[in-house]
Image (spheres, helix red, strand yellow):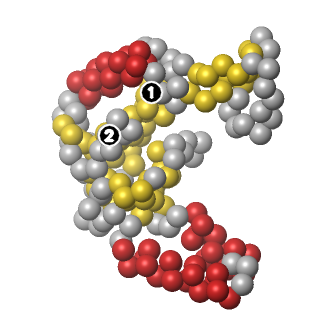
Amino acid sequence: MEGFTITSYGNEFSTGVTRDGRQVLMGLLCPNLVAVFFDAAGSYLSHDVLKLTMAPPRMAVTGVSWPTLAGVESINGIREGPFKINDPTFQSSLAKDLGALKTKVGFIERPIRLQQFKLEGRSIGIELLPRHLAEFITNPNGVADDQEELNEFQSELADWESSGNFVFYWAKGYWIGPNGQVEST
């Protein structure tokens, strides 16, 4: 089977199989727990979005105007900033929720091999190239300012294509090598 191998990465996402043989990718995708299911050949089947027992806390931002901060909401004049996913109480609650989900599906951790996919409306998927290289292919002169930069992009693209790497998106981009290990975020 051709495809892309992905291996669990710390507490950011887990990969494995379920008791019924489906491949699964699961983890926190704020503010929910998400599980994405694939068949044995790596084709996307479905996904579940599960509410967490404890919502991830957010940084309160008062008296500061951050008009360009994406995802900032205002509640009673208090703006909420980014999620504090490393909060110890939240991490403990998340571990319990994730453990319960793993038990429910009969999760066995292992690398999975998937076909390229993208979940619309969610920042989850696999792309062949990092965005800057995809933009370069689409419009080389719009990305490179001069011949030297054009040559650098061409060299980087050749290196990327020969590496066997790909980009896996789970809220952010992970550059993954052909062995399924995260090489960079």
Residue nearest the observer in this picture, 167 or 102: 167
Q: Secondary structure at mark 1?
A: loop
Residue, far front? 63
Q: Is residue 118 above or below residue 141?
A: above
Q: Is residue 61 above or below residue 180?
A: above
Q: Which residue sits at x=20%, y=30%?
A: 106
**Tags 2 and 1 touching, CB below 8 Å:** no
Evaluate whether residue 82 shows in this view. yes
Q: Is residue 153 above or below residue 41?
A: below
> Could you tell me if residue 26 is visible in this image?
no
**Residue 171, image x and y in percent?**
51, 43
Find residue 86 and name its label.
Answer: 1
Quadrant in which the N terminus is drawn: bottom left
Does 138 sit left or right of 85 as displayed? right
Mark 1: amino acid:
Asn
* Residue 133 shown left or right of residue 79 in the figure: left
Residue 172 placed where, x, y %? 51, 47
Residue 69 position, x and y percent, is 72, 37
Question: Viewer-proximal residue, 159 or 48?
Answer: 159
Q: Earlier in the sequence, mark 2 or mark 1?
A: 2
Amino acid marked by disc 2: Gly
Which is more toward the observer, 152 or 93? Answer: 152
Residue beneath label 2, please?
10
Q: Which mark is residue 110?
A: none
Secondary element at tag 2: loop
Q: Residue placed at 68% from the left, 88% from the top?
A: 147
Q: Between marks 2 and 1, how big is the CA–CA gap?
A: 13 Å
Q: Residues within 10 Å of mark 2 (few under 14, many from 20)?
A: few
- Residue 136 x, y percent position in the rendering: 63, 75
Q: Residues within 10 Å of mark 1 (few under 14, many from 20)?
A: few
Residue placed most toward the observer, 157 or 103: 157
